[in-house]
Amino acid sequence: MIRLVRTSGGDVEIDTSGKKEGRGAYLCPDRSCWEKALKGKQLEHVLRGKFRQVDLEQLLESGKDLLKELISG
């Protein structure tokens, strides 16, 4: 599982350490899972805040890169 965290500043980041402070949510390491979570409103509900479009795009791209690393490594 891959952890996403909403920081105190309101940003949403991938938490590779699993120890960042903030409201967290876990996603399976599957591309379709990421796409579904980032396109729907469920993740916003869990992390208690709306995503800016630029944040969604950045998370989707970061997620793709991370998933590639997991698959190849």
Image: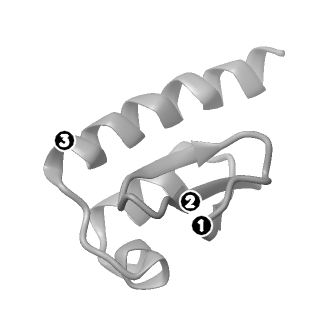
Q: Please state which of the two labelled residues, at mark 1 or mark 2, is closer to the viewer.
A: 1
Query: Which residue lies most toward the left here?
Result: 53
Find numbered disc 2 in the image and state the secondary structure of the residue it sits on: strand
Name the residue nearer the viewer: 30 or 4.
4
Tell me the kind of residue under disc 2: Val
Q: In the drawing, does residue 60 fall left or right of residue 41?
A: right
Name the mark on residue 5.
Answer: 2
Provide the residue designation for mark 1: 22
Image quadrant where one finds the C terminus: top right
Tell me the kind of residue under disc 3: Val
Q: In the drawing, does residue 10 fall left or right of residue 13?
A: left
Q: Please state which of the two labelled residues, at mark 1 or mark 3, is closer to the viewer.
A: 1
Q: Are marks 1 and 2 in contact (CB under 8 Å)?
A: yes
Q: Residue at x 48, y 82 (%)?
A: 46
Name the residue nearer the viewer: 48 or 28.
48
The image quadrant of residue 43 is bottom left
Provide the residue designation for mark 3: 54
